[in-house]
Amino acid sequence: GIGPYTASAIYAIGFNKPAVVVDGNIERICTRLAAIQTPLPESKPEIRVYADYLCRDEIDRPGDLAQALMDIGATVCRPQNPLCGSCPVIQFCLAYEQNIQNDIPWKKKKEIPTRHGKVYIVLTQDGQILLERRPENQMLGGMLGLPTTSWHEKNEELRNNLHKIIKDIEIKELKRKTHKQSIKHTFSHFHLYLDVIVTNIHSKPKISEENRFIWANHKDLNIEEFPTLFRKVLKLSLR
């Protein structure tokens, strides 16, 4: 359970020996003092070099230095809105001199994939709309939404749920209209683009009790009760 950080802290604070104690706070201090503009985590080698310089052998009280840096990072050199006016090392801070202390350290944003699919608005002449209780093993599982295709990273339709819907509820004739606008929604780990397909039928077919699809009067829908993704679709299609 003793890693590099803990070992360095014990060496510096416990034995008063020069050691580089680098945690997130000290990474931030080093980044700002040296105005390191390379994004994390690529900047870690540069930070380490600067931390080595701060904890060089001629420091008389390395234990006090390690604790002081940790305290400055926790209370003064904060991630947002650092208290530069209270900082005891402001005269050495190149980030403050360049007025970039609020901008660094930068973190490289992780690129997330984009997926594509289609979502269907199936409407009857008397104002009924087809809804789907989403399968538990899918995104938004168990929640009430609209029928969609699968969501894939390639802009192609590998499995069309509407075909299954047509078979399940025996819709024979459909009139389609595609909105020119797509819906964009971002989940935590991917972007999603859905083309909106509006489908009009004369009357609603019966659905068996075990079917996960249900009919509802679209005028009675409380759009705000739907997941954000489907709220966007409904606001676009039923306005």
Image (cartoon, rainbow, N blue to C red):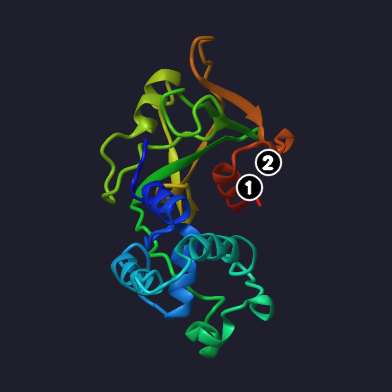
Work out whether residue 181 can be spotted: no
Q: Crowding at label 1, few (<14), some or many (≥20) Cα neighbours within 10 Å?
A: few
Direction from residue 64 to residue 173 in the image, left or right:
left
Instruction: Point out residue 85 in the picture as x, y percentages from the top left corner.
Output: 68, 80
Quarter of the image with the N terminus in it: top left
User: Which of 90 and 228 lies nearest the eye of the viewer?
Assistant: 90
Residue 28, compared with residue 190, is above or below; it is below
Residue 13, compared with residue 106, is above or below; it is above
Work out whether residue 223 can be spotted: yes
Q: Mark 2 or mark 1: which is in front?
A: 2
The residue indicated by pointer 1 is: 238
How far is mark 2 from mark 1, CA to CA? 10 Å
- Give, as a three-letter code, the residue at label 2: Ile
Helix, strand or loop at label 1? It is loop
Q: How many marks?
A: 2
Instruction: Point out residue 39 in the picture as x, y percentages from the top left corner.
Output: 37, 70
Q: Crowding at label 2, few (<14), some or many (≥20) Cα neighbours within 10 Å?
A: some
- Give, as a three-letter code, the residue at label 1: Leu
Q: Which residue is depicted at the point 50% across and 19% down?
A: 212
Q: Which mark is residue 223?
A: 2
Please, which residue is most extreme toward the bottom here?
Answer: 97
Instruction: Point out residue 99 in the picture as x, y percentages from the top left corner.
Output: 55, 87
Instruction: Point out residue 86 in the picture as x, y percentages from the top left corner.
Output: 68, 76
User: Which of 106 and 64 lies nearest the eye of the viewer?
Assistant: 64
**Image marks 2 and 1: residues in contact by CB distance under 8 Å:** yes
Q: Which mark is residue 66?
A: none
Q: Earlier in the sequence, mark 2 or mark 1?
A: 2
